[in-house]
Image: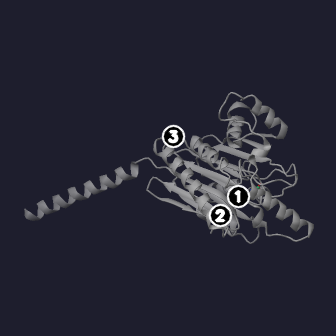
Amino acid sequence: MKYLIAMLASFLAMTASIAMVQAADDSPKFAIVIHGGAGSSSSDEEWNAKRKVVLTHALETGTEMLKTGRSSLDTVEAVVRILENSAYFNAGKGAVFNSATGHELDASIMDGRDRSCGAVGGVRTVRNPISLARKVMTETRHILLVTDGAEKFADQFNDDSQIERVANSDFSTEHQLKRLKKAQANEMKNEKRSDSDKMGTVGCVALDTHGNLAAATSTGGLNNKQFGRIGDSPIVCAGTFADNQTCAVSCTGIGEDYMRNAVAFDVSARIEYRGDSLKKSVHGILFNPKRQVRGGIIALDKNGNIVMEFNTGGMSRAAADSSGRSEVHIGK
Ligand code: ASP
């Protein structure tokens, strides 16, 4: 009898602990990953500390939004706006200069529910290009608007506080002007600088508690880029991709590498067609000796797995999820 009671007690305890584990597993999952651009890592401690403060604020804002049930689409837009408004990242304020000492900004956003997406390229007066990209997605039948057409499209939203207009010089910072002058002086001397010195971009991918993925990327492009050049960041499937069936991706690096290799889409395709894990997929692209893809990738799959990888000297990055993970890294 004693034996039977003991058996029953241990059976009940086991059932209770299984139920507890199931309850924990059933709690809605969310995850968020952010990058502040790949490239060489800076040894300027003060600069790094300032970047860390902004990245931490962006991560906390995004995490709070997801925790309270907001959509991944709203979250990636809000996070990228924070980074665009900061002078310490190459997007919006703080963007690199092009060869004509001006700023041309590129951005894209994608909704993993139905692959709807929007993008802008070469915009000059829109404070938050990512929000204009979202307007292209929701208010037009197109995906990408560039230069004057994008500016004219933005005129329709003069009453919308999300689409604030500024002078092109408002994006300028001393830091980026110094970088431009240095790059141009090196060009004159015919000295080739490392490609890592040209980079920087911001991006965010998120999985919300409703199971939806989204991705957003925004950039000033490459330092000293030719006037009129558009990179991978506003090209869906190159710099940005999201599909609820596979993953959400945001890229940073030499845009031409990412465009010719359709990198963001390739991350998803490797999962869909070959059954690769998210990590294997990203590694297969960034560390493939047969291909040149210089930069970094952040990605998140439908199960909340997180990948942040780069083959450059560093990549500022941050991640958090519903299990309590929360981390911010600057540089290496
Ligand atoms: N991918 C961006 C571009 O080529 C730059 C970067 O990510 O650093 O425009």
Residue labelled with disc 3: 70
Residue labelled with disc 1: 252
Q: Amino acid at mark 1?
A: Thr
Residue labelled with disc 2: 315
Image location (x, y in percent) of residue 71: 54, 40
Q: Residues within 10 Å of mark 3 (few under 14, many from 20)?
A: some
Q: Nearer the viewer, mark 2 or mark 1?
A: 2
The one of 147 and 211 positioned closer to us in this rendering: 147
Q: Amino acid at mark 3?
A: Arg
Q: Amino acid at mark 2?
A: Met
Q: If you read the primary sequence from the N terminus, does the residue marked by circle 2 or circle 3 appear first?
A: 3
The reply to whether discs 1 and 3 touch (Cβ–Cβ < 8 Å) is no
Q: Residues within 10 Å of mark 1 (few under 14, many from 20)?
A: many
> Is disc 1's CB within 8 Å of ligand 1?
yes
Q: Residues within 10 Å of mark 2 (few under 14, many from 20)?
A: many
Q: Is residue 173 visible?
A: yes
Secondary structure beneath label 2 = strand
Task: Work out how far the residue at label 2 is from the one at label 1, CA to CA, in angstroms.
Answer: 9 Å
